[in-house]
Amino acid sequence: MRSVLCPLIVALSVMACARRAPPSRITDTASGAPRTIAPDRPPPAIQAASDGSPTKAEFRNVDFHVGSGIVLRIHFLRGRMRSKSPGEPVDFDHKDSFVIDIQSAEVGLTMADLDHLMNGYVFAYRGAPLRNLHFATQGAQLVQRGILHKVVDIPFQITASMSVTPTGRIRIHPTAIRIFDVDGEGLMQALGITLQRLLDVRQAKGVGVEGNDLLLNPDSLLPPPAITGRVTEVRIARGQVVQIFGDTAAWVASHVQPLVPLDSAAPNYMRFQGGTLRFGKLFMVQADMEIIDVQPGDAFDFSIDEYNRQLVAGYSRNTPAKGLKVYMPDLDKVAAPSAAHHQ
């Protein structure tokens, strides 16, 4: 134990002496609005027919891929999609160009999703203070392991409870801290050190630090497409970190008129209504479309980056009212593109 404690105390003491004065307020790392890609403007006839309104959206049982290994497990979502450029269509091929405004949703992240999100997006920059992060659950608490770099590399494990702040951020509050496999919380208290003083997260995406608590901002934590919405509850369930946005699905079902499905038998789908959608070379004015899972035995595995491969592997049907039902296989059931497809 002495051989472990000596370098630990030296390392933490060096950090305590070398640190800058801590900020008097929360260190907020929201990195500003993401870069917007300006696609080609729609033809004049499309612009004339468009009313500039957002597109209503309803998702059920969708695994929505937003980045490499980062999947939003959408159990239910009600909201709208709108272009960042007023009057422009929602363009599926430029995910930086539109926003999903969430009215009500239940969205989960598995532990693997969190690993990819934190290592591959939130802290994916040179000199990041945290790396090799891995997550697990322990009852109703979240367990985070990784390396903290500050002068030296320090292995740590934090067990934490989760709650939602009045402003809708997710608070991760440590209930136990292990550093070099010893009681880190007591040692940090003895040296007068907090995570806020140790972690410079100004370049991280959607993360702030207050005392020993991490604060996550759902609006800027994820890769595009951007989302807005107020988180009202967070919990561990089914091995996932589950976030409740706005009103519950049960409340919405009993108080809000649902979007009429184009395929009433489909359990897994993404329903769109109103506004103008653009995908590939096609525009849909006064949108009336439903994207449906052809393999509904599990959640609909859908990628905003790879949707065209799924579209090619699927089929579509028009409705008598000129709506469009698009049937797609799950992403993991679609063959990877061959070299010929890139020529």
Image (spheres, helix red, strand yellow):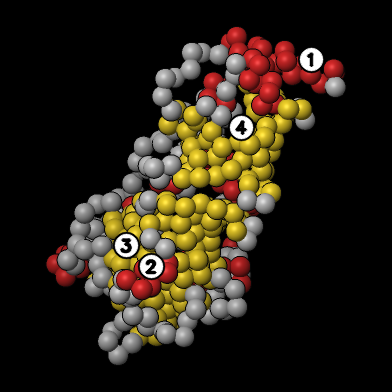
Location of residue 197 with respect to 343 vertically, above or below: above
Say which label, 2 or 1, has the lower sequence index. Answer: 1
| Cα–Cα span, label 1 and label 3 | 56 Å
Residue plotted at (53% across, 61% down): 73
Specify the amino acid type for callout 1: Cys
Q: Which of 228 and 293 is in front in this view?
A: 228
Residue hosting label 2 = 251
The secondary structure type at the circle numbered 4 is: strand
Q: Position of residue 327 (x, y in %)?
A: 47, 79
Res 206 seen here:
yes
The disc label shown at residue 224, or none:
none
Specify the amino acid type for callout 3: Arg
Say which label, 2 or 3, has the lower sequence index. Answer: 3
Residue hosting label 3 = 80
Q: Can you tell which of label 2 and label 1 is closer to the viewer?
A: 2
**In this image, 73 relative to 280: left or right?**
right
The disc label shown at residue 6, or none:
1
Residue hosting label 4 = 130
Res 151 seen here:
no
Say which label, 4 or 3, has the lower sequence index. Answer: 3
Q: Nearer the viewer, residue 27 or 246?
A: 246
Mark 3 residue crowding within 10 angstroms, few (<14) / some (14–19) / many (20+): many
